[in-house]
Amino acid sequence: MSQQGYVATPPYSQSQPGIGLSPPHYGHYGDPSHAASPPGMMKPAGPLGTAAPGGMLPSGPPPPGTHQFGQNGAHASGHPPQRFPGPPPVSSAALSYAPYSTSTQSSYPSPASTSSITQLGGQLSAMQINSYGSGMASPHQRPPGPPSAAPFQGPPRPPQPSVLQPGSQVLPPPPTALNGPGASPLPPPAHRQDGLPGPVPPSAQYQPPSHPGQSLGPGHPPQQATSYGPQMAGAQLSYPGGFPGGPAQLAGPPPPQKKLDPDSIPSPIQVIESDRAARGGQVYATSTRGQVPPLVTTDCVIQDQGNASPRYIRCTTYCFPCTSDMAKQAQIPLAAVIKPFATIPSNETPLYLVNHGENGPVRCNRCKAYMCPFMQFIEGGRRYQCGFCNCVNDVPPFYFQHLDHIGRRLDHYEKPELSLGSYEYVATLDYCRKNKPPNPAAFIFMIDVSYSNVKNGLVKLICEELKTVLEKLPKEEQEETSAIRVGFITYNKVLHFFNVKSNLAQPQMMVVTDVGEVFVPLLDGFLVNYQESQSVIHNLLDQIPEMFADSNENETVFAPVIQAGVEALKAADCPGKLFIFHSSLPTAEAPGKLKSRDDKKLINTEKEKILFHPQTNVYDHLAKECVAHGCSVTLFLFPSQYVDVVSLGFVPQLTGGTLYKYNNFQMHLDSQQFLNDLRYDIEKKIGFDAIMRVRTSTGFRPTDFFGGIFMNNTTDVEMAAVDCDKAVTVEFKHDDKLSEDSGALIQCAVLYTTISGQRRLRIHNLGLNCSSQLADLYKSCETDALINFFAKSAFKAVLHQPLKVIREILVNQTAHMLACYRKNCASPSAASQREDSEQQTGKPSGSFIVRSGY
């Protein structure tokens, strides 16, 4: 992939809001009312050396040890809080600690100087804290000094929690969405001047908050509120360094702790279910330009009313930014995922076929866009203005029709190309190779008959199944039988061609040993109609397992097998598809011979990307030759040991085929899955020898393409075959300013050959909105299309960049998208909620993410 189209976001040079390290999260410390001394332990003395009433623990902290509080309190070390019924404590200020050894409880330091608690009410009133406010320090206080500081000179000591007198217990507030059940903050422990933790006196001295630049004198501890309700906004004292006065405190007080509203955290499951409930089973009409369709997980009926069904085209956003600067700011990829042969449910109308005879489709003279609902007829219907390039064209005489009072043709609803977003044209000879109609397509089945495949019964299984699936070859809707011709080849070190002409009593085998220069030994009798030669084909399929039952050949070829199929299709002058059943690394002496390169030392290194390229350029040349002659390759791989999937799967990837891989194939476990895959791949709708062109209105253009495609130039996408499972992702870039009035128009035209040999044009049209507001851009985003784009662009990038670099690019671009949304589109009231949601859940938040089903 091009660097320009993918590496769009440079690494951040400075921190962005909501990106980076999150503030420390405070755990649930438990309700002090459930605290009691551990069983078998003496009740410790109270604050003044007497037994604590009610069996409560001392209000001061235990001596330093392994239970020392870290960032998340006593439970950070993994000890769960002790929860069991017990008598309620007299004071609500008693702390709940994790159990600790009795050896650390032998003595307690002497109490510090105290004063009356009568000043508490005035202090709280002065600070405007309600009775349920959490402990909050002054925003002007400097961080406390180290615990070993002698006489108090300079920074104040850590705050000391107050102790309410018996009978003055303050009940905690009822649980809310903000504080949760019983979520009470834990005040930091007190310390003596010698650095040891000390108990909390029955009352503490409170002083008004200090002013900026003013330090408290000795004996004036920082102010601390006493109640234990929900935490309030403002600076909170904490110990992220693991101990009071640690280095982590030197950076100043941490940001205020916020609570999350669980209802505001986006849930992808909820989004999917809500979309199903709102739009499931309903009719979705495509008449409105820029309308965001239902999610891909929602089952609904699509009604084409002028724009292509989302089954055919889905965009990363249905509202394009008006300028390139706006697109660069948002960093949202502007792309469309086009699936031109998507399967349509039976309750939806199939595509209409338009046939203008020898005249062919009506097109714009300048940009060559095909007639579609975006064309505007003028001058009484004699001329029309192209919606893509604004060129005014004459209407061909055979296509003339008068206009009604609103400027619409009288036959508007009678012509699919004027009223529908998707339709098909019958192409003229000008659209055919060599100006002559193509022949019906052919399927060639190539079976690896090496020793391992014969012994494990795989060859017999394939031959038995082919008798059934050949009855269900795809056919045109109006035809009774399929026009597809079939041929058969077996191989190991050499190739075996079979003559299954209908007038033969027994099939004939011809062996090609020169795998370096493969040729087709017969023309008449190799590709036949299945209905005419059914008895001979069944006879052959019965004989193949017996024919190679005594074979001891383990070495196989691979590239000559594909070459033989291409040569056979070229000789028959028809497109087609190769079904190859292969099981091992091709080690026989032939073009495309491979060796094991399973080198784990290359993983996560700069040379790792060479593992994603074929070993030899033989497969690259082979893929190009297949595309040029409309030969698609589907590979069924049954490896029991290392096979170079990158090399073997390169041709299927570029020719619109599929790779099916069954590791260590076991007959009783994997046969059903394999048979289902084979039946599905043979029966699905397919088009051959396809060329796709994407046209856009003025102001933007397609710049990059992703998928199983081949491109000789910058505009034409060549595909040997395209079926209902294949999609092409197209990225767009601005080349001028877009207009909000005219919007952005996209037309995808696919020229292909049907299985019966008819040349057709399949057209898909889509109109998008344009806006100069970022909110409109994010509101119209489609996450499924975004993920598709990122996945395909990353898949293409691994050929040129290390995986680590690609991961960083993806993370940076995603972070940039979300940061831009939060900065420009989010409401200020929800900023803290989104930030906390991203930090604590690891999921982005916001209406843009919720709508997209992130």
Image: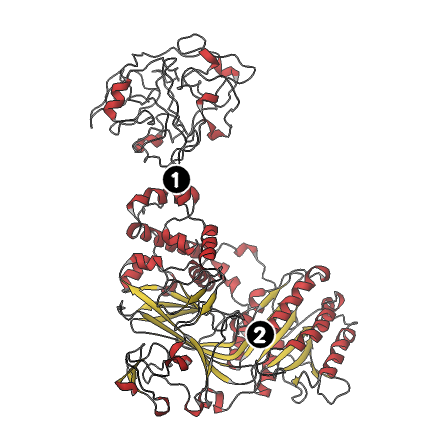
Query: How does the figure colour the protein chain or chains?
Result: secondary structure
- Write down the quadrant of residue 323 in the picture: bottom left
Q: Secondary structure at mark 1?
A: loop
Horizontal side, residue 839 vs residue 545: left or right: left
In the image, residue 16 lies at what x, y percent?
32, 47
Q: Position of residue 581 (x, y in %)?
A: 65, 71
Marks 1 and 2: which is nearer the front?
Answer: 1
Q: Quadrant of the N terminus?
A: bottom left
**Total residue callouts:** 2
Neighbour tally class for label 1: few under 14, some 14-19, many 20 plus, Cα within 10 Å: some
Residue 4 horizontal/vertical position (percent): 36, 65
Res 583 seen here: no
The one of 820 and 571 positioned closer to us in this rendering: 820
Q: Which residue is mark 2?
A: 633
Q: Amino acid at mark 2?
A: Val
Q: Is residue 630 above or below residue 344?
A: below
The answer to the question of whether label 1 and label 2 lie on touching residues, with beta carbons closer than 8 A, is: no
Residue that mark 1 sits on: 260
- Quarter of the image for residue 158 reads top left
Nearer-the-camera pick, 575 or 797: 575
